[in-house]
Amino acid sequence: MVLLVRKYFLGLFLGLSVFLVSCNREFEEMPSSESLVKEAIFESMQEWYYWNDRLPATINSGSYRSNDDLLYDLMYLQLDRWSYLTTQEEFNKAFTGQNAGHGFGFGLGEDGKLYVSFVYKDSPAGLDGWERGWEIIEINGKPIESYRSANGYNFELGESTPGVTNTFTFKLPDGSTTTRTNIKSEYQANSVLHREVLETGGKKVGYWVYNSFKVSPGVSPNRSLEVEETLSYFESQGIDELVLDLRYNGGGSVDVAEQIMNALIPASEDGKLMYTNALNAEKTNFNETFRFSKTGNLELDRLLVITSRGSASASELIINCLDPYMDVILVGENTYGKPVGSFPLSQFNEVLSQNQVELVPITFAIANANGNAAYYQGFPVTIPSRDNPAFNWGDPKEDNLASALTYIQYGGSASNNRQRFQPSTWQMIDSFTGLEKEFPVY
């Protein structure tokens, strides 16, 4: 039979149209064997890994204690910081926003104190009324400083499974304190954390905080209904400028990234090259080219993007693809640096599929219309500024938003933040690995 794989959920996703021909038969019964799974991981890496020329010719599967140990040993660590293993179920849940946990993030304020940085509205934290800007004083009766580690913070919140309970003490913006016991549960995460229209310098400025590129469950073709509704809102408001806040956005579905780009690209650039992809030397026949297809009526001369080290993958794809066609101004801190992407390989391997092992290694690189495909150090910002979660979304006193609005009103003369800017020493993305690094949340 012929199997068509089109834009399956990826890390920095590429819309990969792959036609695979296989014999028309049922899957054979395979034993659930650790050795067979390890061999399947190695074989899949040999076939699909972007740096497969760096792999050993053979492995001794029995010498590895776990599948993760094997994958780590196979990774080209000079450039690969992202390949990972998970399960098919967890992979599919993550890319449609089906989470389990408390449903919030942490961030360091300019004062060095720890604050709630974002909250998913239908999560246990969101349903309990938590908000960005709440200072976290204690967790489970211990002061925050006791959780500090050499690499940032280890909050010891337990597994991300329903029923796990933690107690938090907060100092609220009005100076009062509150203690909340919160029980982890399953919830549907929202990607649009905030949106509004602000008046600045006689212009209507759309402000959009977007936290991850998630496909709406059960929607075909793959797209985000949240994104669709948000774009319609900004169109109806007749905005002159847009500030797209991707400071915590670690990536997600390229279908949704393309959905956003096709709405933001000027109509005059319709049909022009969006990006090209390149697989390894044995898979060049699967390389593809993608072009813009303008949607909606937004007509923007430029785009301001708020970024940080937490802005990665599909967030960087948007920046890279739009940059040849419109002014893209970055405000905040340099992005993470992920010019490569992945797609899950269990669909191509019976042993992985039958054992519910999802292998998601780096499988391709992406280039924009100018050929830029090697931004491993991230994209540098135009206006340096720091995230300050002591202020809620939309507060004009928050440094990143203030810097963006000042730039819109006064242009490059906005230099106050640049003079006092110091890069943050820790960001939440630093506490996560693998699949969770793309969608970091507690």
Image: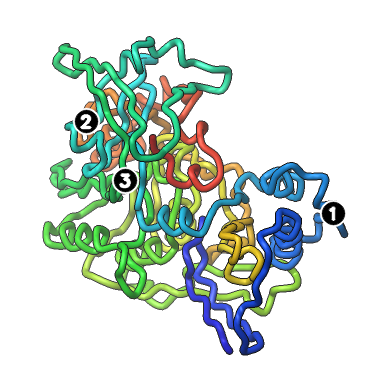
Mark-to-mark CA distance, 1 and 2 = 50 Å
Q: Is residue 278 visible?
A: yes
Does residue 356 sit above or below 389 in this rendering? below
Q: Residue at x 40, y 35 (%)?
A: 332
Label 2 environment density (alpha carbons within 10 Å; few <14, some 14–19, many ≥20): many
Q: Nearer the viewer, residue 76 or 335?
A: 76
The quarter of the displayed image where residue 268 is located: bottom left
The kind of residue tagged 3 is Glu
Residue 252, position as x, y percentages in the image: 44, 55
Mark closest to the chain's N terminus, 2 or 3: 2
Q: Which mark is residue 59?
A: 1
Q: Which mark is residue 50?
A: none
Q: Would residue 279 appear left or right of 397 to someone viewing this image? A: right
Is there a contact, CB below 8 Å, between mark 2 and mark 3?
A: no
The kind of residue tagged 2 is Glu
Mark-to-mark CA distance, 2 and 3 = 19 Å
Q: Which residue is mark 2?
A: 131
Mark closest to the chain's N terminus, 1 or 3: 1
Mark closest to the chain's N terminus, 1 or 2: 1
Q: Residue at x 33, y 14 (%)?
A: 138
Disc number lying in front (2 or 3)? 3
Picture mark count: 3
Q: Which residue is mark 3?
A: 186
Q: Residue at x 32, y 33 (%)?
A: 400
Q: Nearer the viewer, residue 197 or 169?
A: 169
Residue 231, position as x, y percentages in the image: 22, 60
Q: Nearer the viewer, residue 239 or 394?
A: 394
Mark-to-mark CA distance, 1 and 3 = 39 Å
Is there a contact, CB below 8 Å, between mark 1 and mark 3?
A: no
The kind of residue tagged 1 is Ile
